């Protein structure tokens, strides 16, 4: 008798275990199916902050982009009709978006978190070029839905090409690297308003004062920055900011200045 009970248990427990697993799977599938039928309550779009510079994206433009791309309004639609991965892919094709995260919470609100590209420079050469460069060197077109406060570059600037960072002797590469040098130096970032490109050389315009700072070619930048800092810290407090109309750093170890009314 004991042997028969033991054999019964040996057969019954796996059977019950298998039945429990089947029931669990069915419950999960039912829950998933029910969730897919739930309607999207609202679409909530948020823009992640850009650390290095001030930048903003127009949220409404992305709501319009989704309606145009999918041909529907998400609010009130069953969750099963919304392809989350496709929504992310559509958003990430926008030139102003670096990455997008999309998810649905327990209240069936559709959340969209956009990570904008990080602009570091605005190119305005007066010959039709007007765009932003982001921190990775990507070109961001000018648009009403994107605004950023960055350094501005003017003058004789060659056109943007996808491989400009790999090219030798390409002035846009020097301009891009100079921009990063300035932004990575808190003193220079606080000082500089504009970079002007002329005859393959760079001229800086400060945020305060009317001086032209002749930087020259993109070489020995760290040394030139240090000479400029020493000049501002030691000479200008004594002589005054408006005394000079130009500061020239193109000569090794020197800071050559021109007064406002002559040399």
Image (cartoon, grey):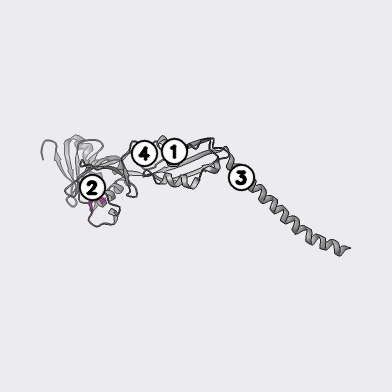
| Residues marked 3 and 2 touching at CB (< 8 Å) | no
- N-term mark: 4 or 3: 3
Mark 2 lies on residue: 227
Cα distance, mark 4 to mark 1?
Answer: 24 Å
Q: Are marks 4 and 1 in contact (CB under 8 Å)?
A: no
Tell me how many marks there are.
4
Numbered mark located on residue 33 in the image: 3
Q: Which residues are magenta?
A: 168-172
Question: Which one is earlier in the sequence, the residue at label 3 or at label 1?
Answer: 3
Q: Locate residue 82 relative to residue 169 in the image: left or right.
A: right
Q: Which label's residue is closer to the chain start, 4 or 1?
A: 4
Does 100 lie within the magenta span? no
Q: Which residue is situated farthest in the bottom direction here?
A: 3
Checking the image for residue 55, the label placed there is 4
Picture disc at residue 67: 1
Q: Secondary structure at mark 2?
A: helix
Q: With 2 as the anchor, is 42 left or right in this view?
A: left
CA–CA distance between discs 1 and 2?
55 Å
Q: CA distance from mark 3 to mark 2?
A: 69 Å
Depth check, mark 3 against mark 2: the one in front is: 3
Mark with earlier residue (3, 2): 3
Query: Looking at the rendering, which quadrant does residue 15 occupy?
Result: bottom right
In the image, farthest residue toward the right: 1
Neighbor class of circle 1 (other Cα within 10 Å; few <14, some 14-19, many 20+) is few
């Amino acid at each position: 008798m004991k042997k028969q009970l033991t054999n019964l248990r040996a057969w019954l427990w796996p059977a019950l275990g298998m039945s429990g697993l089947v029931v669990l799977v069915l419950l999960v599938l039912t829950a998933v199916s029910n969730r897919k039928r739930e309607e999207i309550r609202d679409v909530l779009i948020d823009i992640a902050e850009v650390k290095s510079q001030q930048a903003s994206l127009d949220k409404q433009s992305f709501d319009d982009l989704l309606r145009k791309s999918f041909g529907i309004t998400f609010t009130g639609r069953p969750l099963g009709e919304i392809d989350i991965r496709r929504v992310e892919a559509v958003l990430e094709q926008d030139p102003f978006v670096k990455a997008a995260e999309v998810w649905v919470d327990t209240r069936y609100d559709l959340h969209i978190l956009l990570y904008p590209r990080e602009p570091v420079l605005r190119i305005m050469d007066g010959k039709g070029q007007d765009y932003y460069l982001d921190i990775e060197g990507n070109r961001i077109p000018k648009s009403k839905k994107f605004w950023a406060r960055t350094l501005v570059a003017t003058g004789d600037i060659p056109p943007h090409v996808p491989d400009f960072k790999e090219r030798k002797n390409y002035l846009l590469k020097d301009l891009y690297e100079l921009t990063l040098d300035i932004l990575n130096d808190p003193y220079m970032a606080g000082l500089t308003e504009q970079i002007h490109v002329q005859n393959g050389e760079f001229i800086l315009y400060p945020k305060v004062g009317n001086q032209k700072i002749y930087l020259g070619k993109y070489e020995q930048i760290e040394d030139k920055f240090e000479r400029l800092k020493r000049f501002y810290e030691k000479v200008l407090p004594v002589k005054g900011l408006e005394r000079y109309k130009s500061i020239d750093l193109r000569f090794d170890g020197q800071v050559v200045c021109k007064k406002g009314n002559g040399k």
